[in-house]
Amino acid sequence: MMVMDSRDSTNKTCICACGGVMLYKVGTITRTIRNTEIRIHKVPHFDCTSCGELEFDLDTKIPTLTVYAYQAEISEAVWSEDLLEDMKQGNPWLPR
């Protein structure tokens, strides 16, 4: 697993563990917890063109966001740097 800094505008590709090329994208990801799908939109990530592996910058906090969304029974959110803090405060964070 590689950790990428998605804010680095000079590095829009990298090599995946499978040898494929990973492209920088911003899009919707889906995670599943106990048969519950959670979609988070506008997530910066790298996507492998060969195997489909996704890599995220640590700042996206995708695992933590997914757990909070599951516990709050929310199935969709729009990613932002403040999303986790908004969730902890109980603020709405549905897609806009």
Image (cartoon, rainbow, N blue to C red):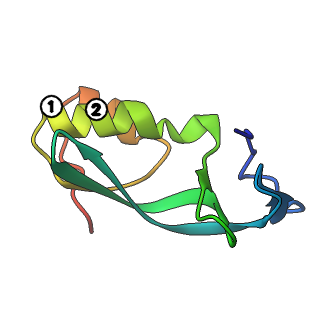
Residue shown at 17%/39% (left/top)?
34
Q: Amino acid at mark 1?
A: Gln
Question: Where on the picture, by quarter, is residue 23?
Answer: bottom right
Residue placed farthest to the bottom in the image?
49
Residue 55 falls left or right of residue 76:
right
Q: Say if mark 2 contacts mark 1, CB within 8 Å.
A: yes
Q: Nearer the viewer, residue 81 or 33?
A: 33
Percent x, y of residue 25: 62, 69
Quarter the N terminus occupies:
top right
Q: Residues within 10 Å of mark 1 (few under 14, many from 20)?
A: few
Q: Amino acid at mark 2?
A: Val
Q: Secondary structure at mark 2?
A: helix
Residue placed farthest to the left in the image?
73
Residue 71 - label? 1
Residue 16 falls left or right of residue 65:
right
Residue 9 falls left or right of residue 85:
right
The residue wearing badge 2 is 67
Placement of 24 over or under 17, stated as above or below: below
Question: Where on the picture, by quarter, is residue 91?
Answer: top left
Label 2, label 1: how far apart the Cα atoms are: 6 Å
Q: Nearer the viewer, residue 72 or 22?
A: 22
